[in-house]
Image (spheres, grey):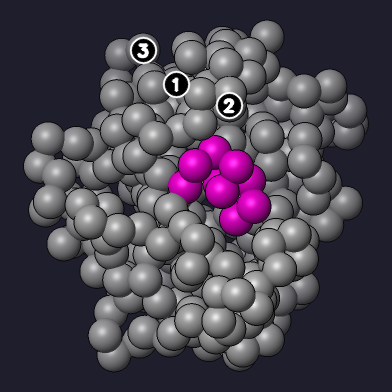
Amino acid sequence: MTLDLAQTTAPADIAQEPGSVAGQAATDVLGRIGNLETRLARSPAEIDAAQAVRYRVFAEEMQAQLSPDAVRRKRDVDAWDMVCDHLLVLDTSIEGDAEEQIVGTYRLLRQEVAATSGGFYSQSEFDVDALIARHPDKRFMELGRSCVLPAYRTKRTVELLWQGAWAYSLRYGIDVMFGCASFHGTVPEEHALALSFLHHNVKAKDEWSVAARPELLRTMDLMPAEGVDARKALTAMPPLVKGYLRLGAMIGEGAVVDHAFNTTDVLIVLPIGKISGRYLNYYGADAGRFAS
């Protein structure tokens, strides 16, 4: 499902909300490390630039099959772009406008916004409804469409993406973060080591259990537990997945092959209350560690 979002503005509830991070152009920086900083998109032009970065990564690098209009415009665009906030990583050492400084992006969708805007993106692949129904007292937030330009795929950039999401979640009283994370390619067996490690060691259970939709589920149990070398498995994982595991994230049951995006997707589930204490200390319980 795609819409022509070239002229869309930021979501109304964000742009017009008193004190919203999206409306604080001078004070909305959520994290900074060296010449890199993270904040929310401030304008339709910046959202458009983030969509251009997504196109470069998803279509040009990973061979995602996008719509003819997306290919013509060289933008990765879908219906959720209108209702999500867009977290950016910018390299401030690059001369030019902010749109030219964007090197990474992440989409943030709060539960109350999703409830009035067609639901969560990941519901098309995973049974998120059942997970949310089990926790009526908690506020969920979906993280999605994460991408970083090749030259910036470092620990520092991943730290900033996390810092931005963490600061945003604190500001909006989020209890649980979740979202799809991707392995490149549509053959899960090519990632047998990493997927099997996730299945045997960090699968979400009990009140946090969540599975891929039955008609889409591909097993992650591709190797016996005793045959999985943990060190090699972690090395084989995408940096974002590895970063979430360090924080204490769990993984849903089963993977989903997304042929359009040429990926194998898993579901990340990260309750705020389960985040490792040492990382809360590192980033700051008030998200202030990298904010200035």
Relative to 147, 236 lies left or right: right
Residue 244 placement (x, y as % from top left): 56, 46
What residue appears at the point 28 percent right and 42 percent down from the top-left corner? Answer: 140
Residue 239 placement (x, y as % from top left): 70, 54
Residue 216 placement (x, y as % from top left): 35, 87
- Number of on-image labels: 3
Quarter occupied by residue 15: top left
The residue tagged 2 is 279
| Residue type at tag 3 | Gly
Cβ atoms at labels 1 and 2 below 8 Å apart: no
What residue appears at the point 16 percent right and 62 percent down from the top-left corner? Answer: 130
The residue tagged 1 is 21
Residue 245 placement (x, y as % from top left): 56, 48
Question: Does the stretch in magenta take in 247?
Answer: yes
Tag 3 or tag 2, which sits nearer the N-term? 3
The residue tagged 3 is 19
Q: Is residue 194 above or below residue 143?
A: below
| Residue type at tag 2 | Tyr
Farthest front residue? 226
Quarter in which the C terminus is drawn: top right
Q: Estimate how packed mark 2 is, as few (under 14), some (14 to 19) or many (20 or more) residues with alpha carbons within 10 Å.
A: few
Circle 1 or circle 2, nearest the eye: 2
What residue appears at the point 51 percent right and 24 percent down from the top-left corner? Answer: 277
Q: Mainly helix, strand or loop, the magenta region?
A: helix
Res. 213 in view? yes
Magenta stretch bounds: 241-249
**SS under mark 1:** helix
Q: Is residue 124 above or below residue 204?
A: below
